């Protein structure tokens, strides 16, 4: 594509000029993620969290996989500590996203705190996908997607939580299967090669094999060992 | 409103949120070379796969620390089928819910 590189002009360009393609992608990502927000709100209430607690998780934690994990672990009878540990292991990738975004965003003070809170899969993903257009577009992609997802994720969490609360028994509405199905929907696109699919199957097997013998929540955290083994092995093979 | 921090659900909400933010701000605060080891990057990309897979298995096949096969298994099976057919996310979730709910009411 013969798009002009505007990266080095971007720094001083007027803020009001938003690239239309960047805005369109940010909006479509923000809305799509909203569907997960409904699933999260419903899953959270089904797991025993109140509507207020569900909304606080979306407002304060604001990183989908970690939120699903903590409600999943407590819903399955796991302790708060197991839930926090599993969620935090899933949140480590946001640290790496921050490392990647820091030189692009060049933020300090309050803006750095806001940028950090908005640093998730989607905002980083859109920013990186706009980098070929320039640094200004990458920054716009990050902020538009981060703010857009924040707004829709929280609105849809509330809707999902209220909806699930009105339903009564989660199993009567199939919510007990909808929650693992939502996880599977998050997981599926990540399984891009044979090694990753093998890891997924191995993690399922290990977690199920450990379930009868360990406190709820622990078998899930334990599968992170498999990620370490597969990670080291991949390095030896390649 | 009184918030009892010993209550596990509140503890989980506060603890998860606190660590999530600390992990995020860390990325903007540490020198890049500290976390750019390729082994660390590879393992970090695989951790979500292991944890999410384990969660799916535990939520689909266990009840009170026992392995069980019930309506959830059929629901998740339909979700797998929907994903193989490249169905969009809402279709995946709703088809799983509909299958599981139907079997719950029959059984």
Image: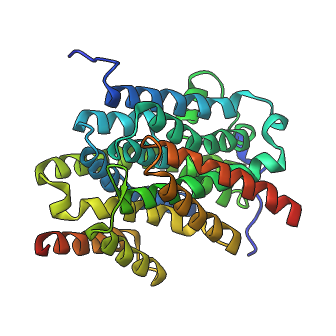
Residue B13 x, y percent position in the rendering: 38, 31
Query: Residue A91 lies in what quarter of the image?
Result: top right
The correct choice, above or below, for A149 with respect to A53 in the image is: below
The coloring applied to the image is rainbow
Residue B41 x, y percent position in the rendering: 75, 49
Q: Viewed as shown, does residue A38 lie left or right of A189?
A: left
Q: Viewed as shown, does residue A196 lie left or right of B37?
A: left
Q: Residue furthest front?
A: A213
Q: A28 or B34, which is in the foreground?
A: B34
The reply to whether residue A10 is in sight is yes
Q: B86 or A176, which is in the foreground?
A: A176
At 84% from the left and 44% from the top, the residue drawn is: B37
Q: A226 or A1, which is in the foreground?
A: A226
The correct choice, above or below, for A211 with respect to A35 in the image is: above
Q: Residue furthest top?
A: B2
The reply to whether residue A6 is in sight is no
At 31% from the left and 38% from the top, the residue drawn is: A55
Q: Considering the image in quadrants, where does the C terminus of chain B appear?
A: bottom left
Count of labels shown?
Answer: 0
Residue B97 x, y percent position in the rendering: 26, 68
The correct choice, above or below, for A215 with respect to B98 in the image is: above
At 52% from the left and 68% from the top, the residue drawn is: A188
Q: Considering the image in quadrants, where does the N terminus of chain B appear?
A: top left
Q: Viewed as shown, does residue A88 lie left or right of B102?
A: right
The correct choice, above or below, for A6 with respect to A97 in the image is: below
At 62% from the left and 70% from the top, the residue drawn is: A197
Q: B12 or B105, which is in the foreground?
A: B105
Residue B50 x, y percent position in the rendering: 59, 56
């Amino acid at each position: 594509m013969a798009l002009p590189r505007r990266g080095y002009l971007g720094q001083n360009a007027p803020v009001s000029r938003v690239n239309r393609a960047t805005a369109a992608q940010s909006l479509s990502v923000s809305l799509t993620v909203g569907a997960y927000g409904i699933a999260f709100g419903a899953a959270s209430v089904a797991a025993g969290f109140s509507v207020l607690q569900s909304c606080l998780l979306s407002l304060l934690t604001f990183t989908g996989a970690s939120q699903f994990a903590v409600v999943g672990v407590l819903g399955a009878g796991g302790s708060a500590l197991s839930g926090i540990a599993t969620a935090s292991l899933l949140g480590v990738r946001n640290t790496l996203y921050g490392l990647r975004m820091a030189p692009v965003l060049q933020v300090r003070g309050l803006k750095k705190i806001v940028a950090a809170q908005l640093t998730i899969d989607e905002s980083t993903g859109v920013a990186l996908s706009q980098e070929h257009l320039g640094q200004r577009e990458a920054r716009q992609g990050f902020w538009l997607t981060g703010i857009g997802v924040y707004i829709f994720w929280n609105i849809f969490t509330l809707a999902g939580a209220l909806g699930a609360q009105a339903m009564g028994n989660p199993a009567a509405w199939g919510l007990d299967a909808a929650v693992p199905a939502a996880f599977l929907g998050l997981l599926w696109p990540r399984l891009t090669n044979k090694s990753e699919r093998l890891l997924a199957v191995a993690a399922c097997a290990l977690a199920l094999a450990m379930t009868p013998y360990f406190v709820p929540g622990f078998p899930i955290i334990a599968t992170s060992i498999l990620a370490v083994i597969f990670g080291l092995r991949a390095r030896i093979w390649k | 409103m009184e918030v009892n921090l010993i209550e596990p659900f509140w503890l989980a909400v506060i603890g998860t949120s606190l660590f999530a933010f600390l992990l995020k701000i860390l990325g903007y605060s540490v020198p890049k070379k500290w976390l750019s080891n390729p082994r660390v990057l590879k393992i970090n990309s695989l951790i979500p796969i292991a944890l999410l897979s384990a969660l799916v298995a535990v939520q689909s096949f266990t009840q009170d620390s026992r392995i069980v096969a019930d309506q959830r298994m059929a629901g998740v099976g339909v979700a797998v089928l929907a994903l193989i057919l490249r169905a969009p996310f809402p279709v995946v979730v709703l088809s799983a819910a509909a299958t599981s709910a139907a079997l719950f009411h029959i059984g």
